[in-house]
Every structure is written in structure tokens, then in C-alpha cells.
């Protein structure tokens, strides 16, 4: 089956959003924690967080147009800090619920049954119930002209994670930590390890 | 367990790369197909492809510093087109093998046992063995100053997918198509559906 841009343009808006959001493959499931200059905490589910670099340690994520209310973006720009918290299978419904449009002055932490947690190093709230949590400072942002979105980059300031979750070679075992994946806009998936492969070399081809 | 930026800085280089690459959560597994101006095809595994927008239909991905040989990036800039092909469990070892450093003039398609496939709409090669394949045109790029990487955005020109793989609400069932996820730099994961949740509303809280 082949779909053209014209076929996409002809789709109903929500149908198209579900479809095109499926095309990148599996996505990370993260709760972004922030606090406003008035002290109101905010929690928002993002599926666009990606690795940007290991040294310096950087992560990036995409923000939709700033023309609509974007508490997370505004809080990051005002406070300069935010947290990224992995969604795991025991909190995924509460995590999804943070995407409801709550009014100004209302915290998703309270409404969705999640608990803010603070450290000395980062002003923004972590999610106490999460297993893997990263505190970051705002580093850089890029305005994408094609659809008025923003790719925002943060620098890692602190990492909270379960004891004994780092494997011998430095890999963090996020599957054992319960971290889940998202597809499209509303589908949540657990994972099963298929394989861990060695560093690929031209003279040692791997066959399926 | 808490890790500081100093702890990260003190890690051995490969250990740190494995660790920090784990922190964003699960990642998409995609093969990017391109062709050079000399007609040499190229195939490269990317774990940074994300959804950028549904209308216009846009996808983005991160490229490491251009100072080292970056055939994929150079081919996209020269030809203006590229393909994104979902990695599934039957081809994941061959997909991983494309990350080996093959010399100029050698195609990863040939070396890794994958087959180029062309359509009239897109000049770049698709992966015949893939189930979900997207053809794109170069749209925009952003230079990230913090670590000299590039966030590149493509516009969707064509989508090839299995018949009957789109669910009633537009969601593409990538799990049934065999699409897999990546964690860190070398771990591959199949998925299992945990749940599909309704559009979140403030007055209809979801509890775990």
C-alpha cells in the first residue's frame, strides 16, 4: 500500500495526527517536570525526548507552537531548569492523564496523583514515583520554521536512578527499571530484550 | 543512587556513551537510505528519528558532527531526498551491521545483505525487506552549537506500508508490523501492548 502527500492531506485531522505520529517508530515516554515563577508545579508527557550528546551530556525534545498555552516551555525558559522522568508501567495511566488541559494554577502532580520531589541541585520537581530521573538546565533552542515548533536542548545536571541498574559496560537497564515506550499518540508498550549486539565491524558481518 | 556531572565526566568514554545514550528512554530503530551523486547507495542505522509534525508531515533526526565522514548527511544534502525504513525483528542484526565503518564506494546494502528498492516519487533507495518505509525530501536543518550536531527535518513525500496495518482511528499498528525499539547504543527490544488510552480530559481522570 502506498500513500501520497495528497492522501495525507485528505485525511481527517485526528486520524492524520494518529497516523503520522506512528511513522517515526517507537518513542520515549517521559514526564517533564517544571515549576512556574509563581511556584506552581507542572508535569507534562513528552514522546519526543532524544539523546543529543554524551559529552557534554545533552538531551533534546520538541515543543509544539508557542502560540497555544505551553506551561512547560514557559517554565523552562523562566526557571532555566527542568526534569525528565521515565514513565514505567505502574504509572503510565497517571502519566497519560497529565496531557489533559488543566487550567492555569492547577498542578498536574495533584490532579494526576503523582508526587513532586526535590534535590538541592535542581529547582524543578522530579516525579517521586519514577525510577529514572534526570535534572537538566536549559542549554539552547532552535526554531523550526517549517511548522513553528521548537527543538529545545538541555544539559544534564543530575541523574537519579535505582541502585545496581547500570550494567558492566555502562548501559542503563531501562527495561528492568520498567521504562515503557509509546507509539502514535496513545499506545503504551512494555518491551522484551531481543538482543544486545557487539560494536559492528566491516570484517565481522552479523547475519539474522 | 545520584550521579553528578562530575561523575559523568569521570567515566571512561565508551562507558559514558553507553550510559548517557540510555537516559532518553526507548528509541526508534530506523534505517536511513540515501544515494550519492556517484550512484553509490548508503544505508545507516539511526535511533534519533522523531515525529516533528503531522500537517505538513515532517520528521526529524540528529546527525553527529560533520567533521567525520557522514555519508548519509552528505547524500541528503546533495540529492535532496532520503528514506526512513523501520527496523523489524527479522532484519535487526543486518540493520545493526550497517553501523560498521565501510570504506567510500562500498554500499551497506550489499555488505549487510539488504536490498535497495525504488519508486518513481523518491530518488533514494528504500529497504525492500522493511515493512514500513517513508520517502522524504530535505526541508530544513538546525546547527546545535552546544555539541556541533545537526537536527535535520524532512518532509514526507511517500509512505509504503503493509495492507490493513492502519487501525480504525488512523494509528499505524507498528507492533504488528514487527517494528522494534532500541535502548542505549546496542540493545534491541520487541514490544508488547500495555494499553491504548483515550484522549485525556481533566474531568475524567485515569487511575493506574
Image: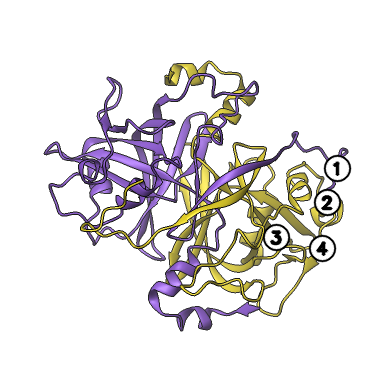
Chain colours: A yellow, B purple
Dot 4 falls on a residue whose secondary structure is loop
Which residue lies under the disc numbered 4? Answer: A115
Question: Mark 1 vs mark 4: same chain?
Answer: no
Residue A64 circle label: none
Label 1 and label 3: CA atoms lie apart by 19 Å
Question: Mark 1 vs mark 3: same chain?
Answer: no
Residue at x 56%, y 72% (from the top left corner): A166
Which residue lies under the disc numbered 3? Answer: A33
Q: Nearer the viewer, mark 4 or mark 3?
A: 4
Label 2 and label 1: CA atoms lie apart by 7 Å
- How many labels, in total? 4
Residue at x 79%, y 49% (from the top left corner): A94
**Circles 2 and 1 in contact, beta carbons < 8 Å:** yes
Residue at x 28%, y 38% (from the top left corner): B114
Dot 3 falls on a residue whose secondary structure is strand
Residue nearest the viewer, comparing B179 with B156: B179
Amino acid at each position: 500500500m502506498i500513500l501520497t502527500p495528497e492522501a495525507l492531506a485528505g485525511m481527517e485531522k485526528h486520524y492524520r495526527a494518529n497516523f503520522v505520529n506512528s511513522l517515526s517508530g517507537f518513542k520515549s515516554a517521559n514526564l517533564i517536570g517544571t515549576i512556574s515563577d509563581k511556584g506552581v508545579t507542572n508535569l507534562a508527557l513528552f514522546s519526543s525526548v532524544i539523546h543529543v550528546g554524551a559529552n557534554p551530556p545533552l538531551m533534546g525534545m520538541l515543543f509544539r507552537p508557542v502560540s497555544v498555552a505551553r506551561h512547560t516551555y514557559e517554565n523552562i525558559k523562566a526557571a532555566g531548569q527542568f526534569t525528565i522522568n521515565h514513565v514505567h508501567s505502574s504509572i503510565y495511566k497517571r502519566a497519560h492523564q497529565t496531557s489533559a488541559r488543566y487550567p492555569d494554577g492547577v498542578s498536574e502532580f495533584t490532579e494526576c496523583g503523582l508526587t513532586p520531589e526535590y534535590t538541592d541541585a535542581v529547582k524543578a520537581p522530579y516525579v517521586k514515583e519514577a525510577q529514572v530521573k534526570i535534572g537538566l538546565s536549559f542549554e539552547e533552542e532552535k526554531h523550526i520554521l517549517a511548522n513553528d515548533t521548537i527543538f529545545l536542548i538541555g544539559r544534564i545536571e543530575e541523574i537519579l536512578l535505582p541502585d545496581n541498574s547500570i550494567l558492566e559496560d555502562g548501559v542503563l537497564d531501562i527495561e528492568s527499571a520498567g521504562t515503557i515506550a509509546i507509539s502514535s499518540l496513545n499506545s503504551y508498550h512494555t518491551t522484551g530484550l531481543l538482543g544486545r549486539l557487539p560494536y559492528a565491524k566491516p570484517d565481522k558481518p552479523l547475519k539474522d
